[in-house]
Image (tube, rainbow, N blue to C red):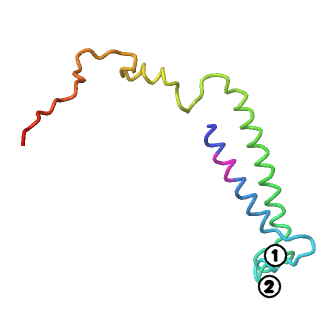
């Protein structure tokens, strides 16, 4: 659940950045970004101002809501984490792998001796 909300949160953040960069300043012409008077036919007679402003406000409210939800999940994370890297001792116990402290007495660790040849 937390991962899904986090993915939605990131998508909203990217959409907010794009929408804010698309908007023009108060003194700029709205048609400059969309090529002349074509923007009035796509977004209505008022241009892009109303559409982009409303969309930005809705996305900002959604971003705020997902931020609060993720903060709530972070406060409840005092228990065991859902996903992450477990402790090394836990991994060794689960796999039953020998550690560096274990002695392997049945393993021959001697190096092979090469015979010298005269010639």
Residue 99 sits inside the magenta stretch: no
- In the depicted structure, whether residue 42 falls above or below residue 19: below
In the picture, the disc for residue 105 is: none
Residue 89: x and y, percent? 48, 20
Give the residue drawn at x 80%, y 54%.
58
Left/right of residue 89 with respect to residue 47 in the rendered view: left
Closer to the camera in the image, 38 or 18: 18
The residue singled out by tag 1 in the image is 44
Q: Residues within 10 Å of mark 2 (few under 14, many from 20)?
A: few
- Percent across and percent down for residue 31 are 82, 80
Between residue 13 and residue 62, name the one nearer to us.
Answer: 13
Whether 8 is among the magenta residues is yes
Q: Secondary structure at mark 1?
A: loop
Locate residue 45, reporting x and y percent.
85, 78
Extent of the magenta region: 7-11
Task: Give residue 20's quadrant in the image.
Answer: bottom right
Image disc number at residue 36:
2
**Residue drawn at point x = 39 percent, y = 20 percent:** 99
At a point 23% along the width and 16% down the height, the residue shown is 106
Give the alpha-carbon distance from disc 1 to disc 2, as whole Å: 14 Å
Comes first in the chain, label 1 or label 2:
2
């Amino acid at each position: 659940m937390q991962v899904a909300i986090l993915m939605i949160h990131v998508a909203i953040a990217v959409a907010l950045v794009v929408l804010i960069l698309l908007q023009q300043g108060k003194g700029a012409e709205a048609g400059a970004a969309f090529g002349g008077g074509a923007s009035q036919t796509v977004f209505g007679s008022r241009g892009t101002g109303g559409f982009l402003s409303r969309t930005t406000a809705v996305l900002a409210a959604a971003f705020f809501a997902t931020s609060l939800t993720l903060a709530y999940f972070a406060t409840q994370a005092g228990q065991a984490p859902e996903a992450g890297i477990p402790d090394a001792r836990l991994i060794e116990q689960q796999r039953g792998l020998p550690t560096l402290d274990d002695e392997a007495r049945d393993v021959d660790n001697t190096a092979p001796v090469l015979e010298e040849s005269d010639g």
